[in-house]
Amino acid sequence: MFHNRLHQHWISLSLLTLVGGAFVPQLSVMAQPTRSEGIQISMAFEPPPGEGMPSRTAGGGSRGQTLAAIQTAPPLMALVPAFYSQTNRQETDIKGLTVAATPTFFFYVPAIPAKEAAFSLKDENNNDIYQTRLTLPNQPGILSIALPKDTPPLKIGQTYRWSFGVIYNDENAQEPKVVFVSGEVTRTEPDATLTAKLQQAKPLEQAKIYAENGIWFESLATLAQLRQNQPMDETLTKQWNELLQSVGLESIANQPFVNALEN
């Protein structure tokens, strides 16, 4: 288990160092496809064994660094469940399970005076797994960051720490400022029964199966892909809202996607 407060200063420095690079991929607003019919499936996340119900809190703790100069409502946040810390009930641990070797991460970026962002993923020994920097879109919303297929695959049973920060220039400071969120992702392996269910299910049913089994990252990514392909589908919108509400993220459920998901 990582200790978030001990890593906050390190995260800021790491993200600022990452911004010092040269390559800045541009995020583009996705095109809106036509509407299609949905299937009536209730969508709610069930926490993994040993975890209580998700509890979303703003600012401080593992959510990251909140600066008064750019406080917004809702604030910068990761689309990942936040659970009360087992060591300090005043803080929350932002974490989730994945079955993917290279999962996709989602973040809500509010309307703030920041043009650049950086993402970092490290293993338990603080070794770099993946780093990237990007230019933020001109509108607030939900953006996705997919690990490239040539990224070293996450190892089953291991926990990794990710950090996402937005960088902006403060008139009263000599150096750029970083506001960030950070958390953990653990790769798990589905058993034979779960694997069989997933193989027989359609994508929407897969999202529900993942959610029922505490596998957050694939439940979210599968449903997000469906919503991007069918943005006007009222059933998918309802299920998206239900999933985010089940982990306390209802405040950003209606926010648009601001970049296209990779298939």
Image (cartoon, rainbow, N blue to C red):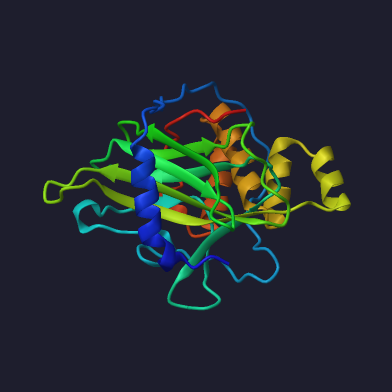
Hey, which residue is sitting farthest left in the picture?
172
Name the spot of residue 6 as percent of width and height, x first. Answer: 42, 67
Q: Nearer the viewer, residue 134 or 246?
A: 134
Which image quadrant: the C terminus?
Answer: top right
Nearer to the camera, 90 or 257 = 90
Q: Which quadrant does the N terminus fall into?
A: bottom right
Question: Is 180 or 78 nearer to us in this picture?
Answer: 180
The reply to whether residue 73 is in sight is: yes
Q: Is residue 90 left or right of residue 45?
A: left
- In the displayed structure, 101 sits above or below 225; it is below
Tell me if 66 is positioned left or right of 97 in this view: left
Q: Position of residue 217 (x, y in %)?
A: 61, 48
Residue at 40% x, 54% y is 11
Residue 51 locus on image (x, y percent):
63, 69
Image quarter for residue 136? top left
Identify whether 246 is placed above or below 30: below
The residue that appears at 54% across and 31% down in the rendered structure is 261
